[in-house]
Amino acid sequence: MIVCIYFGSKREETAEETAKAPRSIMRRMVTKQEIESFLSTPKIGKGTFGEVYRGTLDDGDVAIKVLHVTEDTKEKAQREITTMRTVKHKNIVEFIAELYEIPMLYLIFEFMDGPSLHKIIHNYNDHKYTNGDAINWLIQAAEGLNHLHSLTPKLIHRDVKPKNILLNSEKSIVKLCDFGNVRQLGSCMSNESGTHRYMAPEVYNGVKYTEKCDVYSFAITVWEVYSRTNAYGPDKQNYQILLTKVSTESMHVHWSMLI
């Protein structure tokens, strides 16, 4: 089975997608009191980047990303803010506001009330899907990525993976998220960035790369959507072993699980 998704083509939004799209919340200033009310709610996510909460702003649901900013992470945080202020697309999670109170940074985004593509792929019993579902999700994710690549200057996401592709509860709308690793094409890009199993070989090898590294990461995502397994085996494995697998394209697939 071969899936071809063309970057550069555009797909018209269906009436169903328009009706089910999350209500847009106007970008605006946010107060410390509003932030404190968000932090009283249960966490919905946690990682090396910080914590994520769900809250309500102007009668709409939002996600609040809480970062502890250090000298090492300040540039990455500022890059995400700068990018999200200027990017607007139906397949990219919308940025609403930020509040920076040293050393804490609070970023507010629209809330996607469905699972990540990663959860759909790997929770086989809870999430059944068809070839049509897969094509719909992947086309929408590709359109969001294509928008970044069509800007002037081009923006490179550098961490495309199923965990950074979110869906709504009906699984009809798909949006890219997490822009902490984004870079403009033309800036110095030979340093390793992203999640190892989705990195293109040129990123691993420390040579100059372009937006094609995103296309490679997207291709690995397509592989995982159709195989419902990790392309290069278990999550936790030796860096050098993983690098060898990427360089030799030694992918791992359970054929019986192909959708």
Image (spheres, rainbow, N blue to C red):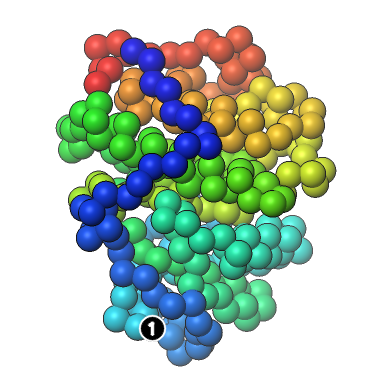
For the point 50% across and 67% down, the residue is 95
**Is residue 215 left or right of 103 when viewed as pictured?**
left
The residue carrying pointer 1 sits among few (fewer than 14), some (14 to 19) or many (20 or more) residues within 10 Å by Cα, namely: few
Q: Look at the image and tell me in which quarter the N terminus lies.
A: top left
User: Which residue is drawn at the image coordinates 73% and 44% (left, top)?
Assistant: 185
Q: Residue 4 at x, y = what percent?
A: 42, 23
Classify 215 as above or below 87.
above
- Outermost residue, right side: 188
Image position of 87 with respect to 118: above or below: below
Task: State which quarter of the image contains the C terminus.
Answer: top left
Image x and y of residue 239, in percent: 63, 25
Q: Nearer the viewer, residue 150 or 250?
A: 150
Q: Is residue 125 visible?
A: yes
Q: Residue at x 38, y 83 (%)?
A: 37
Please give the count of numbered marks on the rendered protein.
Answer: 1
Q: Is residue 117 left or right of residue 85?
A: left
Mark 1, secondary structure of its residue: helix
Q: Position of residue 165 (x, y in %)?
A: 42, 45
Amino acid type of disc 1?
Ser
Q: What residue lies at 45% left-to-right and 89% top-to-bottom?
A: 33
Q: Is residue 96 left or right of residue 71?
A: left
Residue designated by label 1: 37
Q: Position of residue 3 (x, y in %)?
A: 39, 21
Residue 229 visible (yes or no): no
Position of residue 251 relative to residue 210, above or below, is above
| Relative to 74, residue 29 above or below | below
